[in-house]
Image (spheres, rainbow, N blue to C red):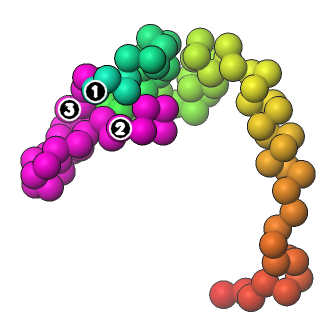
Amino acid sequence: MLSAVLPFYDDDQYAMGNRIRKAEYKFGADSWNGISTEAKDLISKLLVANPSKRLTINQVFEHHWISSQIDILEKLYARVNKIEPKIPIASQKKY
C-alpha cells in the first residue's frame, strides 16, 4: 500500500461495503499528500466499479508510473527470484 491508508475506509462497515461496491474513494488523508499524481492516477484507473472500464494488465504495465519505475521493478523481481522456499518443493504436501 502506498499510503498505509485504505481508500474506502469508513467507521461503519455497511457504509464501507457500499463505498467499495460503488468505487467511492478519496485520497484525502494526509498520508496521501506525498504520493505522486501519477501513482494516484494509476490507482484511480484500477479502482473502478465496472470491470470492463478498469485498466487491463497490459495497460497497467504501460502506465507512466509503472513504466517509469522499471529499474526498481527489475531489481525487486531479481531479488524475489533469489529467495529460496523455506520448505523444499519435494517435501510439500500435495492437495
Taking 51 as reference, is 93 left or right?
right
Image position, residue 20 (x, y; %): 23, 43
Q: Measure the C-alpha gap from mark 2 to mark 1.
A: 7 Å
Circle nearer the viewer, 3 or 2: 2
Query: Under tag 2, what secondary structure?
Result: loop
Question: Where 49 sits versus 15, above or below?
Answer: above
Q: Main secondary structure of the magenta part?
A: loop
Q: Is residue 12 visible?
A: yes
Is residue 58 in the magenta section? no
Q: Measure the C-alpha gap from mark 3 to mark 2.
A: 15 Å
| Depth order, front residue of 1/61 | 1
Callout 2: few (<14), some (14-19), or many (20+) C-alpha neighbours within 10 Å? some
Q: Is residue 53 visible?
A: no
Quarter of the image for the C terminus: give it: bottom right
**Which residue, given by chain and number where applicable, does mark 3 sit on?**
24
Q: Earlier in the sequence, mark 3 or mark 2?
A: 2
Image position, residue 81 (x, y; %): 85, 50
Residues rendered magenta in the picture: 1-28
Q: Residue at x 18, y 51 (%)?
A: 17
Taking 93 as reference, is 45 left or right?
left
Kind of residue at disc 1: Ala
| Depth order, front residue of 71/3 | 3
Circle nearer the viewer, 1 or 3: 1
Taking 49 as reference, is 57 left or right?
right
Name the quadrant containing residue 88: bottom right
Image position, residue 90 (x, y; %): 88, 82
Image position, residue 72 (x, y; %): 75, 26
Name the quadrant containing residue 32: top left
Query: Under tag 3, what secondary structure?
Result: loop
**Which residue, given by chain and number where applicable, does mark 2 sit on?**
5
**Which residue, given by chain and number where applicable, does mark 1 sit on?**
29
Q: Measure the C-alpha gap from mark 1 to mark 3.
A: 15 Å
